[in-house]
Image: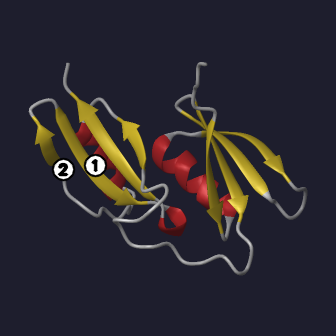
């Protein structure tokens, strides 16, 4: 049996605004909207990964703080973490951590996405 990642599914109180964040900050490309005048789902291509952003029901709970059970964060690889962090901070993105060297070949930083989503930027050395 072979498995491959098909998509990441997020819930949002405003899927159109959440999708705009991923488009503006990370260059995602919107590929579809479902639901007509009242958008129920926006589908993005984020570097080859399908991201579904679905309208959350009114009774949806606020996100938990980390560490948590379930999906903790989305990891996005970058070639130059310093430039990426500087660019995103310049756009007003809030970071949970500054750049951290996890090992000689891995540097990471965490930022806040829409609706409590946590996003990790990571740069791996060759």
Task: Name the residue: 71% across, 44% down.
Answer: 43
In this image, 76 relative to 123: left or right? right
Of badges 1 and 2, the one in the foreground is: 2
Badge number at residue 99: 2
In this image, 73 relative to 37: left or right? left
Where's the C terminus, which quadrant?
Answer: top left
**Residue 126 seen in render:** yes
Q: Is residue 60 above or below residue 53?
A: below
Q: Which residue is mark 1?
A: 85
Task: Name the residue: 35% across, 67% down.
Answer: 66
**Residue 86 seen in render:** no
In this image, 81 relative to 75: left or right? left
Q: Check disc 2 and report its element: helix, strand or loop.
A: loop
Q: Is residue 92 above or below residue 125?
A: below
| Res 92 → quadrant | bottom left
Q: Outermost residue toward the left?
A: 104
């Amino acid at each position: 049996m072979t498995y491959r990642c098909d998509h990441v599914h997020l819930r949002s109180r405003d899927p159109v605004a959440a999708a705009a964040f991923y488009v503006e900050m990370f260059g995602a490309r919107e590929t579809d909207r479902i639901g007509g005048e009242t958008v129920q789902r926006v589908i993005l291509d984020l570097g080859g990964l399908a991201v579904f952003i679905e309208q959350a029901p009114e009774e949806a709970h606020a996100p938990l703080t980390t560490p948590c059970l379930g999906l903790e964060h989305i990891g996005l690889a970058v070639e130059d973490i310093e430039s990426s962090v500087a660019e995103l901070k310049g756009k007003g993105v809030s970071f949970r951590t500054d750049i951290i060297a996890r090992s000689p070949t891995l540097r990471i930083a965490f930022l806040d996405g829409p609706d409590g989503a946590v996003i990790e930027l990571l740069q791996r050395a060759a």
